[in-house]
Amino acid sequence: MNKKMAGLFISIMMMMISLSSGSSASKALGVYEVKRGNFSAKFTNWGATLISLLVPDRYGNMADVALGYQSVYEYTNDTSYFGSIVGRVANRIGGAQFTIDGIHYKLKPNEKNNMLHGGVIGFSDVLWKVTKHESDRISFSYHSCDGEEGFPGDLEVSVSYAIVAPYVLSIRMRAKSLNKATPVNLAQHTYWNIGGHNSGDVLSDVIQIYGSQYTPTDDNLIPTGKLVSVKGTPYDFLEPQTIGSRIAQLLPLRGYDMNYVLDGGKKMKLAARVYNEKSGRVMELSTNVPGLQFYTANYVQNVTGKGGFVYQPHSALCLESQGFPDSVNHPNFPSQIVRPGKTYKHNMVFTFSTR
């Protein structure tokens, strides 16, 4: 049994003990719905995960536009981060190490010598507490202990999902450092296919990304520290382009998996827009953080999802607003260090429409 499976086994055993002891539902694995009219979303407190989102097409036909599993229990063994909150630090930390204020910290690597999405047991692999559940909103919280996956300090984390208007989903992530300076970079990791989760690949979808630069990486997807213009590269989506129009130029890569430097810095701004011609659905993402990871589900292969549909590479796209990857090791990147008493704030707004 590997380290992640052992950790998941312990978490599931704790969950079963919680269920058998008659503790509150907020501490047991569950499914929770929020809705306004015909716009509805479902979540589980395992990883504070979005497990479905129903959106109409131009004719009013509803479809679930989020990839996921048929059973909530399958999320406890997920390795693709379907719909979850990832952290304490999303994306990659090179060498699984960093130094803050002269103190060197060694983390638990889970991708070769690097750390990906918080380590062996990140925030996507733990049971969160449901702190509020109303008809159109839900909030989760999690206490991350000092030393968890090697990170310094105790951290209080929360995420709130709310339907704030027809076809508008707001996501607010917060984290407060209690006693030590620590890096924090949370991301919401839903795999979107706005044609419908079972509609095939997203290569014909049209995307526009409001980022004039990107952060190139080495062969292990660790940023080099440079900021490079997207002009003249396959990463240029300043004007709308189909996702598949230049994907062949990325070989030997399997598709897009790159952090964009969003125009507008840390203010709330439009980050990306996606259009599916067949359904007429449009999805827009606005955020207040400086980066956006655009990922085309390159490593999703033969994954059995909802209704028995089998997901393959490019069956979805992820729009992970974030701080820059490995920022803790690049002083020229926007800092993701949260000091005691300070609060990390990450806002996202997904707006759906049709045309």
Image: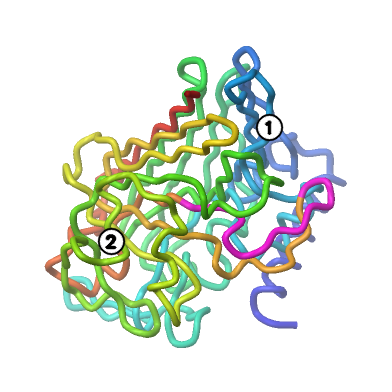
The location of residue 192, given as percent across then percent down, is: 55, 46
Q: Which mark is residue 93?
A: none
149 lies above or below 312: below
Q: What residue is shown at x 61% (from left), y 35% (from top)? A: 130
Give SS at disc 1.
strand
What's drawn in magenta, residue-wise? 306-318
286 lies above or below 241: above
The location of residue 96, given as percent across then percent down, is: 39, 80
Q: Is residue 314 magenta?
A: yes
In screen coordinates, is 220 left or right of 31?
left
Q: Is residue 38 magenta?
A: no
Can you tell which of label 2 and label 1 is closer to the viewer? 1
- 113 or 121: nearer the viewer: 113
**Picture quadrant of residue 300:** bottom right
203 lies above or below 147: above
Q: Amino acid at mark 1?
A: Ala
The location of residue 335, given as percent across then percent down, is: 19, 59
Q: Which residue was labeled with disc 1?
A: 63
Q: What residue is shown at x 52% (from left), y 36% (from top)? A: 277
Does residue 182 appear anywhere in the picture?
Answer: no
Q: Which mark is residue 324?
A: 2
103 lies above or below 12: below
Residue at mark 2 to residue at mark 1: CA–CA distance: 33 Å
**Picture quadrant of residue 247:** bottom left
